[in-house]
Amino acid sequence: MNRELTLKELTDCGVVAVIRAPDPKQVLPLVGVLLEGGVTGIEVTMSTPNAIGVIGELSRSLSGSAMCLGAGTVLDADTCAAVIHAGARFVVSPVLEPTVVETTRRLGAICIPGAYTPTEIFQAWNMGADVVKVFPANGLGPGYFKDLLTVMPQLKLTPSGGVDVKTTGAWLAAGAVMVGAGSSLIDKAALSAGNFGVIRETAKQFILAVKMAREQLR
């Protein structure tokens, strides 16, 4: 597993789709339209039924695609090892759990633990996080990233929680290397109705927002 390549793929895309599907059969077609829309970072959370099996299926079925596959809401070392063996190239957690960080690093995947306070974020980075997921970010705002990166510019940060198309540019301008998007990208009503076209168009809007923000930063 090439960790540097995985990190580059994630940050180049700039968006990670956070998938919490009630029906595991929805995931493969959902990922297909996300890829069509340009969102290649795919995070299957453990709240998805049979999530480890779903990750394995995606890894096999879309092995030749642009997808960068990962697992989310990983809370313990055993689950961490299982998702990586199933095909996850990056592991995301809402909290800072040292055993998850250690297992992710040891098995060669990209480590994205969750943290909130400056102390937690610094601890996560020192433990070996490749990117620190600041969660929940909706109560903090992009200015929080600017303040953190002013004093700790070595950090790589990504916001999760409340990020949408309208705020994506502001997060990137504040220094985020990418954003995580769940319900704002994958509309629950559209998913339930099988209206994947809506999700494809939203994915395109997210990718456009990333492109425009990065062009303004040049």
Image (tube, rainbow, N blue to C red):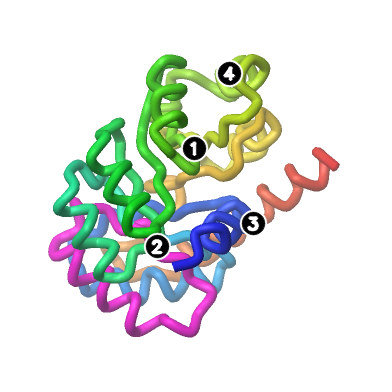
- Nearer the observer: mark 3 or 2; the answer is 2
The secondary structure type at the circle numbered 4 is: helix
Q: What residue span does the magenta drawing correspond to?
A: 43-70
Residue type beneath disc 3: Asp
Residue type beneath disc 1: Val
The secondary structure type at the circle numbered 3 is: helix
Task: Give the CA separation, mark 4 to mark 3.
Answer: 22 Å
Task: Give the CA separation, mark 3 to mark 1.
Answer: 18 Å
60 is within the stretch colored magenta: yes
Q: Is residue 133 left or right of residue 206?
A: left
Chain-order first, disc 2 or disc 4: 2
Residues under numbered marks 2 and 4 in contact, where contact means CB atoms less than 8 Å apart? no
As drawn, the residue found furthest toward the front would be: 106
- Identify the residue at horizontal 24%, vertical 61% (top origin): 83
- Nearer the observer: mark 3 or 1; the answer is 3
- Nearer the observer: mark 1 or 4; the answer is 4
Residue under numbered circle 2: 89
- Identify the residue at horizontal 20%, vertical 42% (top origin): 75
